[in-house]
Image (spheres, rainbow, N blue to C red):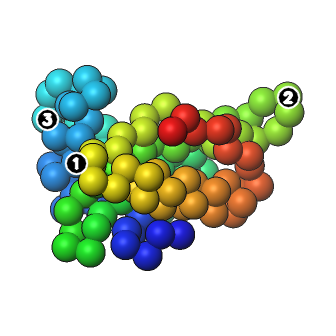
Amino acid sequence: MNAAYNVTDMTAAQVDRAFPLVTAVDAVSDLSDWRQFCQRIIASRSEETANEWLLVCANALGYLKGLCLARISQTEAGSILDVPLYVVATVVDEEGVQSALRARLQMLAATLGATVPVIPA
């Protein structure tokens, strides 16, 4: 994983800070809806049956540079970690942020016994 970035599960304190990232890709348009969506996923992490994760990528100063939504899906071929939302918000080190996010997704998939589809660069 890229040492310049820390990729973790989103915390409640990061929800509002992540809102500009999702609006930049027109994923949501209302802060209230975004807060409810995030709270549902954050609350579900304590359940054994959690199947969605919001991951954020922060630089050393704590600024959010990327985020993604990962969902486990069951298919005939087995478990797949689907990534329907993937945002990189930097032009300075886009490759570094992507690398850090991909590494965390690979670790999550391995933990879950799932595969990760190729994430476009």
- Residue furthest front as drawn: 92
Query: In the shown orientation, is residue 27 left or right of residue 9?
Result: left
Residue 108 appearing in the image: no
Q: Residue at x 28, y 28 (%)?
A: 25
Name the foreground residue: 58 vs 2.
Answer: 2
Q: CA distance from mark 3 to mark 2?
A: 37 Å
Q: Residue at x 57, y 60 (%)?
A: 103
Tell me the amino acid under the disc marked 3. Leu
Q: What residue sits right under mark 2 in the picture?
A: 76
Callout 2: few (<14), some (14-19), or many (20+) C-alpha neighbours within 10 Å?
Answer: few
Tell me the amino acid under the disc marked 2. Glu
Q: CA distance from mark 1 to mark 3?
A: 10 Å
Q: Circle 2 sits in a helix, a strand or a loop, which is it?
A: loop
Q: Are marks 2 and 1 in contact (CB under 8 Å)?
A: no
Image quadrant of residue 3? bottom left
Q: What residue sits right under mark 3 in the picture?
A: 31
N-term mark: 1 or 3: 1
**Figure check: 120 above or below 7:** above
Q: CA distance from mark 2 to mark 1?
A: 34 Å
Image quadrant of residue 28? top left
Query: In the shown orientation, is residue 101 left or right of residue 115?
Result: left
Q: What residue sits right under mark 1 in the picture?
A: 18
Callout 3: few (<14), some (14-19), or many (20+) C-alpha neighbours within 10 Å?
Answer: some
Q: Circle 1 sits in a helix, a strand or a loop, which is it?
A: helix
Q: Position of residue 112 (x, y in %)?
A: 70, 56
